[in-house]
Image: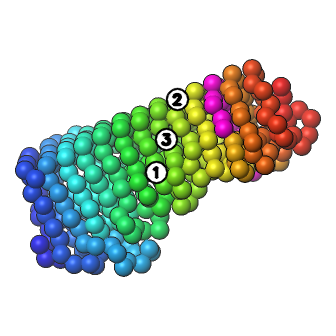
Amino acid sequence: MPEGTTLRISKSMRIEGNGTTLRVAGSKPPTTHLLNADSLRDGSQLEIKNLRIEGPSTKNWDPATENIMGGISWQLYRTWNSSLVVRNVTITGGYGSGIIRSGGGRFEVTDCDLSGWVDGIAFFESHGGSGALELRNTILRAPANSKYSSIGLYIHPHLNLNADTITGLDWNRYLIYVNGTPASTGRHDLKAVSAVNCALVQSGSSSQTTLIRCSESGLPKNGGSFLKGPVTSIGSTWEGAGMIAVLEGVAAERSFVNDTIRPKSTWMALGSKTTGTVTLTGAQVDLAGKAALLKLTSASTTAVTITSSQIRSTSSSFPINAEGGSVQLVGTAVPRNSRAVLPGRLIV
């Protein structure tokens, strides 16, 4: 199909692709959405399945190129009682987003393989309404060349997310990026979500994030996960080169239960003005090279508790470096060469 092609969807419908490929010619950023459902009113139902969309090549694009068009787009405010279902759809190439859904409502993506110059999926709602994304058995992969700030999934923090069996590949920032109005109470539940060569998650500052058997590995391009608010991780694996950061001034609880931690550098840094608590229970930690488990800078007031964990270290760095805050070890041996600047920083 020629550049600028757009197929408008103006009423509720089910689109059965039967394996059809829609290929858009050219190598420039698109100027239109391909499947454009932006006129669908509240209460509409749209299902798209068994389809392949190939956008223009991104090979020679400048990393700062702006691109706001979607392979699939439904953007209309206050469509809280509507439903978008996408199943067995592949989107490649240079659409800004694989799928854009703005306006809230029910949103399901299953058995898909999605990429986009900016993000694989964008799900947002700006009027305080409701919405939930069910994301299952899906790959979110950055194209060979993507925007310098590319992410797998962008979601507003008051919208709920249930993600199960998801793989994210090679995004320049996060696989899951929760961002928007901070005063929100959404839930973001991630199960068997794997981030390869990108950070796993930026969580919301007040919404609850739960990670079950998730993983972060490889070489993230912009550091590790950013845990802004309350987070619970159970049975997850952390073995990437990125460092976990924690938002300043948010007194949230970050809890890690039965996690495996094999970082390539410092796993978690608790810096200036960080507060709240961090707890590790039943962790298996292996430190080699210059890897470290924790660094608390002098301005940190974070209280860290490590319980019933094993910390094995051959690292040349301080495994635990407590310049500020406090680190208490319960039923856990202090790893060799750990450091506390002042008495009471490291409690055994």
The residue at the point 35 percent across, 64 percent down is: 143
Q: Secondary structure at mark 3?
A: strand
On residue 196, which mark appears?
1
Q: Which residues are magenta?
A: 272-286
The picture places residue 62, in percent across and down from the top left corner, at: 42, 78
Q: Earlier in the sequence, mark 3 or mark 2?
A: 3
In this orientation, which residue lies closer to the viewer: 175 or 185?
175
Q: Which residue is mark 3?
A: 215
Q: Which residue is mark 2?
A: 234
Tell me, yes or no, whether the two marked residues, 2 and 1, touch with CB atoms within 8 Å.
Answer: no
In this rendering, would 118 be left or right of 185?
A: left
Q: Secondary structure at mark 1?
A: strand
Tell me, yes or no, if residue 80 can be seen here.
no
Q: Secondary structure at mark 2?
A: strand
Measure the alpha-carbon separation of dots 3 and 2: 11 Å
Q: Amino acid at mark 2?
A: Ile
> Is residue 234 placed above or below 32 in the rendered structure?
above
Measure the alpha-carbon separation of dots 2 and 1: 19 Å
Q: Amino acid at mark 1?
A: Val
Count of number-bearing discs = 3
Looking at the rendering, which quadrant does residue 75 occupy?
A: bottom left
Q: Earlier in the sequence, mark 3 or mark 1?
A: 1
The residue at the point 25 percent across, 72 percent down is: 56
Q: Tag 3: Cα neighbours inside 10 Å, few (<14), some, or many (≥20)?
A: many
In this orientation, which residue lies closer to the viewer: 168 or 4?
168
Q: Tag 2: Cα neighbours inside 10 Å, few (<14), some, or many (≥20)?
A: many
Measure the alpha-carbon separation of dots 3 and 1: 8 Å
The picture places residue 202, in percent across and down from the top left corner, at: 52, 48
